[in-house]
């Protein structure tokens, strides 16, 4: 989360445990990282229920992978493909 919003883990931990409200300048980035609107983040609107529960942590990792250079992205896709093929064989 910290990497995605350009902050530190310490700052994120502070807002998770010590403060009820993060600073306004982080709201848009937090909403994007959490895949919600700022209104949903602030409680102005209810959070829309998604059809299937997604793994936000995994989704954030994929967003980080998309930012990598093409060669590194290809290498990671090959590793992922290897794991997926192994899982298919096991089933």
Image (tube, helix red, strand yellow):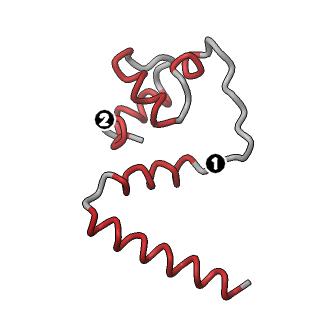
Figure quadrant of the N terminus:
top left
Residue 47 or residue 11, whichever sits in front: 47
In the picture shown, does residue 11 fall above or below 51?
A: above
For residue 45, side relative to residue 75 (left or right): right
Instruction: Tell me the element at label 1.
Output: loop
Q: Mark 1 points at which residue?
A: 54
Residue 43 or residue 52, whichever sits in front: 52
Instruction: Tell me the element at label 2.
Output: loop
Residue 14 or residue 91, whichever sits in front: 91
Residue at 46% of width from left, 24% of height from top? 18
Where does the image place residue 20, in percent across and percent down from the top left? 51, 18
Where does the image place residue 90, in percent across and percent down from the top left? 69, 87
Figure quadrant of the C terminus:
bottom right
Where does the image place residue 86, in percent across and percent down from the top left? 59, 85
In the picture shown, does residue 14 fall above or below 69?
A: above
Q: Which label sits on residue 7?
A: 2
Question: How far apart are the alpha carbons under marks 1 and 2?
Answer: 24 Å
Where does the image place residue 70, in percent across and percent down from the top left? 28, 63
Residue at 51% of width from left, 50% of height from top? 59
Q: Residues within 10 Å of mark 1 (few under 14, many from 20)?
A: few
For residue 38, side relative to residue 2 (left or right): right
In the picture shown, does residue 86 fall above or below 48?
A: below
Q: Earlier in the sequence, mark 1 or mark 2?
A: 2
Residue at 55% of width from left, 46% of height from top? 56
Labels 1, 2: front one: 1
Q: How crowded is mark 2: few (under 14 residues within 10 Å), some or many (20 or more)?
A: few
């Amino acid at each position: 989360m910290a990497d995605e919003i350009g902050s530190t883990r310490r700052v994120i931990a502070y807002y998770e445990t010590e403060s009820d409200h993060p600073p306004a300048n982080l709201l848009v980035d937090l909403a994007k990282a959490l895949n919600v609107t700022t209104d949903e983040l602030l409680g102005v609107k209810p959070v829309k229920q998604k059809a299937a529960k997604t793994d936000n942590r995994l989704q954030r990792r994929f967003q980080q992978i998309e930012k990598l250079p093409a060669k590194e992205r290809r290498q990671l896709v090959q590793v992922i493909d290897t794991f997926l093929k192994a899982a298919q064989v096991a089933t």
